[in-house]
Each structure stands twice: as C-alpha cells, then as structure tokens.
Image (cartoon, helix red, strand yellow):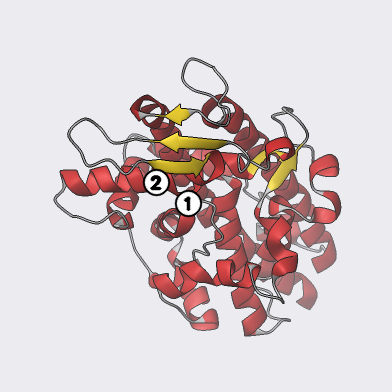
C-alpha cells in the first residue's frame, strides 16, 4: 500500500528535475520504504515540510559555505563518450555518485550528531534524483546541455502554449516535468503547473501495476546484498562496511552509465536520431519522445532511494552488532 510520510520529503532542489521532480522522487521513495526505516528516521531525525526541504540544497549550493558542494550534483564525461568511468569522471569521489556513497553511510551513523545525519539524509534524497536526470550525467563539452540554447513549445493543439527560450539542460530539469504535470492536471481538473501530486500518483500506481515486475530489478542494482546478520557474523564493523561499499560503488557506477546512455539516446537527440544544436526549436514531437523517459527515470530514482535508505539502516545495525561481538 502506498504510504506518504512527510519525513522523506527532504527533496532538495538544486535544479536537477527542479523542486517538483525532486519532491516526486521523495514521494515515490516514501511509498516504497519499509515502515521500520521510516520509524527510525522519524524517531531519530524528526521531520520537515516538503516546501522547506525542496529548497534546502539549492540554498546551500549557492551559499558561501556550500559552494564546495556544486560538483556533487552532476557527472561530466569527456566529449560524446556517453559512458561513466569512476576513475576518470569522479576523481576523489567528488561527483554525484561519490556523494551518494559518502552520505548514505552517514544517515544512520549514531556516532555523529543528529544535525549531521539530517544533512546526510537531504543529500542522499536529492542526489539520487540528480543521478537519474539524463543531463546530470552528461558531456563536459556542453556542460550537460547548459550551452545548447533552444526554443520550446510543447503544448498540444488547443492548449495554452508556454513556449520560450531555454537551454537543453533546463528543459530536462523543469520544462518537461512541468508540461507533464500541467497536462495531467488539466485532464483531472486539478489545476496548477506545480501540482506534483498528479504525476507522483501516476508513477506510484505504475510501480504497483505495470512496472511492478521491473521494480525488483531497479532496486537490486543498488542493493547491498551482504547486510544480513549471518553474512556479517564475526566480521568487524570496518570489514562489513567495506564489503557493502564495494557493492554499492559498483551499483551506482552501473546506474551512472545507464543515465549517460539515456542522455545520449533521448535527451541530446530527437526521435529521428538527429542531434540537437543551439538555435533549434523543440516542439510537441520532442515532448512526446522525451516524456516516457522522464517518467521512468523519476520512478527508478524513487525506487532506488527506498533501497539505499533501507540498506543503509541494515548496514548500520549490523555494524553496531559487529562492534559488540
């Protein structure tokens, strides 16, 4: 059963997907989260509102003390490589997947302060969303589409056009998501271009229905399979943590590679394979081409968010056991 719990709405909003997309990822993660994990988070770290959480990362990223975190929101590969290589593209773990690796290990670490763990939770939720935005694992040559300037008009015939100048990166951050929400709201007489609930519900319903068989595979990619007590019995906390970090690093690397590939097949190009260049106009055809990718990437991000939080709690508990042994 879908359960929306405000705690997991720490959807930070550093532009990738925009606040609506990040809130949707958090909500999907919430709907899939084991009740035990939610209870621990609620008791240990408290809760915050959707709106407050959705702006935190953006504010931090642009603050004097937070500017260092900007590289954690994306991954740049050289030229048109369309692939991810950790050693090449994430030196010293200073990139999106490096942040996920780091902060997921801190959320439930009771040796650190609650304030630090709350920040770690915000980073994990936001960065999982970033990882699935196709132009956040993209070419350094055009800064993830920021240097590709386009005109957009995605409205269907008979619907008010919200056309304008844009860059390709922002198209994927916000314009496509807002257009989907706008059309769903119109269909349901819900109103509002930022009514993220209509898209979130659609994706949660699909995860419980037509995508249910895919859900296990999507989650398994980032699963830390060695967190059961039998596997960790007799191991030191350090050894247990290292074993699971290796698995998670491999899973995150795989996801980054897939996101890079999706960007090259569905973001940088039209349905006919022609590459988008500055000065191009993107119309309804591009929207319909991109929409399924937007929806499935948001769903995958929410599913994997639930998985990584569940595994982080399990690992923390097993590490505590190992310390006692």
Q: x, y percentage for residue 197? A: 30, 56
> In the depicted view, which residue is nearer to us: 155 or 199?
155
Other-residue count near label 2 (Cα within 10 Å), few / some / many at <14 / 14–19 / ≥20: many
Q: Is residue 32 left or right of residue 157?
A: right
Quadrant that contains the N terminus: bottom left
Q: x, y percentage for residue 70? A: 69, 60
Q: Is 83 placed above or below 74 here? A: above
Residue 106 disc label: none
Residue sitting farthest toward the left: 189
Q: Which residue is mark 1?
A: 302
- Marker count (numbered): 2
Q: Mark 2 or 1, which is nearer the eye?
A: 2
Q: Is 150 placed above or below 174 here? A: above
Q: x, y percentage for residue 251? A: 68, 43
Other-residue count near label 1 (Cα within 10 Å), few / some / many at <14 / 14–19 / ≥20: many
Asked if residue 300 shows in the view, the reply is no
């Amino acid at each position: 059963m879908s359960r929306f719990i405000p705690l997991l709405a720490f959807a930070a909003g550093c532009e990738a997907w925009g606040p609506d997309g990040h809130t949707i990822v958090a909500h999907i993660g919430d709907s899939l989260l084991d009740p035990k994990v939610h209870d621990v988070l609620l008791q240990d770290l408290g809760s915050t509102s959707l709106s407050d959480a959705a702006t935190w990362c953006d504010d931090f990223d642009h603050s004097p003390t937070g500017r260092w975190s900007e590289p954690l929101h994306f991954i740049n590969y050289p030229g048109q490589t369309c692939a991810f290589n950790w050693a090449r593209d994430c030196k010293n773990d200073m990139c999106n997947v490096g942040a996920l690796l780091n902060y997921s290990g801190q959320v439930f670490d009771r040796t650190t302060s609650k304030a630090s763990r709350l920040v770690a939770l915000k980073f994990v939720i936001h960065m999982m969303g970033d990882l699935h935005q196709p132009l956040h694992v993209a070419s350094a040559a055009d800064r993830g589409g920021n240097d590709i300037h386009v005109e957009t008009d995605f409205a269907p015939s008979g619907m008010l056009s919200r056309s304008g100048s844009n860059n390709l990166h922002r198209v994927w951050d916000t314009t496509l998501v807002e257009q989907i929400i706008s059309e769903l709201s119109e269909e349901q007489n819900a109103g509002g271009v930022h009514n993220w609930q209509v898209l979130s519900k659609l994706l949660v319903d699909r995860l419980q229905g037509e995508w249910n068989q895919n859900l296990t595979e999507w989650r398994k990619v980032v699963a830390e399979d060695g967190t059961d007590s039998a596997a960790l019995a007799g191991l030191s906390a350090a050894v247990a943590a290292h074993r699971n970090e290796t698995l998670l690093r491999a899973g995150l690397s795989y996801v980054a590679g897939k996101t890079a590939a999706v960007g090259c097949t569905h973001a940088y190009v039209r349905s006919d394979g022609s590459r988008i260049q500055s000065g191009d106009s993107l119309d309804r055809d591009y929207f319909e081409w991109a929409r399924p990718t937007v929806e499935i990437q948001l769903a995958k991000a929410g599913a994997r968010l639930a998985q990584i939080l569940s595994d982080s709690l399990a690992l923390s508990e097993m590490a505590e056991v190992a310390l006692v042994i």
